Each structure stands twice: as structure tokens, then as C-alpha cells.
Image (cartoon, helix red, strand yellow):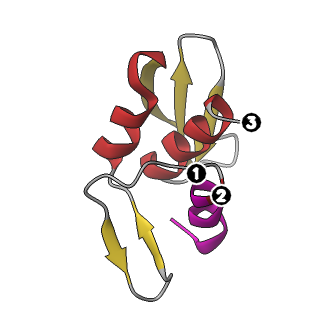
Amino acid sequence: MNYELAKQLKDAGFPKLDLVFVKDLKHFIPSLSELIDACGDKFHWLNKMKSQYDEDVWNAMALSKEFGRGKTPEEAVAKLWIKLNKK
């Protein structure tokens, strides 16, 4: 997870669960399971597919049909959580 996405999670109020401190980012980075748990009952599924450019793309979907997309499963679910928790 890059710095900008970690900052977006922090700014959106991501709960401080059992997070791992990543020194080079100076932020707490949640694991995939923590991200999914934070989405709660709204989380629906996570899958990997090939893009039109033959790159792996991860998609996370909520029951409300909102989605997050990223290069890693963590990035996809983090983006979904941010969408689900916009103030």
C-alpha cells in the first residue's frame, strides 16, 4: 500500500485495530483481513482478473455495488472501505 492510500485511510478515520507499523510510511497499515473486517456486512466479494493490458487487477465489491480496484487485494479493499465511509 502506498503512502497516499495509507493517508486516505487515516484521514477517512480507519479504526486502529491490530495494525502493523510500517516505519518508512510513518503510518499504521492494516492487513487484508483487517480491511475486510472493517467493511463489515457491507463487504461482498474480492476477485482478481486480467486487465485489457494483461495486468492483474483486484476488485472488491460491496453489497451496495460500490467497488474498489487496485494492484493488490489490500489496495482494492482499502479503496472500497474509503468509498463506504466517505463523510
User: Which residue in the protein does label 1 denote?
Assistant: 55
Bounds of the magenta segment: 1-10
**Closer to the N terminus: mark 3 or mark 1?**
1
Disc 1 is placed on an element classified as: loop
Q: Which mark is residue 87?
A: 3
- Counting residues from the N terminus, which is met first, the one under dot 3 or under dot 2? 2
Q: Is residue 49 above or below residue 3?
A: above
Q: CA distance from mark 2 to mark 1?
A: 29 Å
In which quarter of the view is residue 33 placed?
top left
Q: Is residue 30 left or right of residue 79?
A: left
Judging by the rendered image, the residue that carries numbered circle 2 is: 11
Q: Position of residue 28 (x, y in %)?
A: 41, 69
Mark 3 or 1, which is nearer the eye? 3
Q: Can the viewer see residue 50?
A: no
What residue lies at 62% left-to-right and 11% top-to-bottom?
64
- Inter-mark Cα distance, 3 to 1: 32 Å
- Residue 20: where, in percent of width, then height? 29, 68
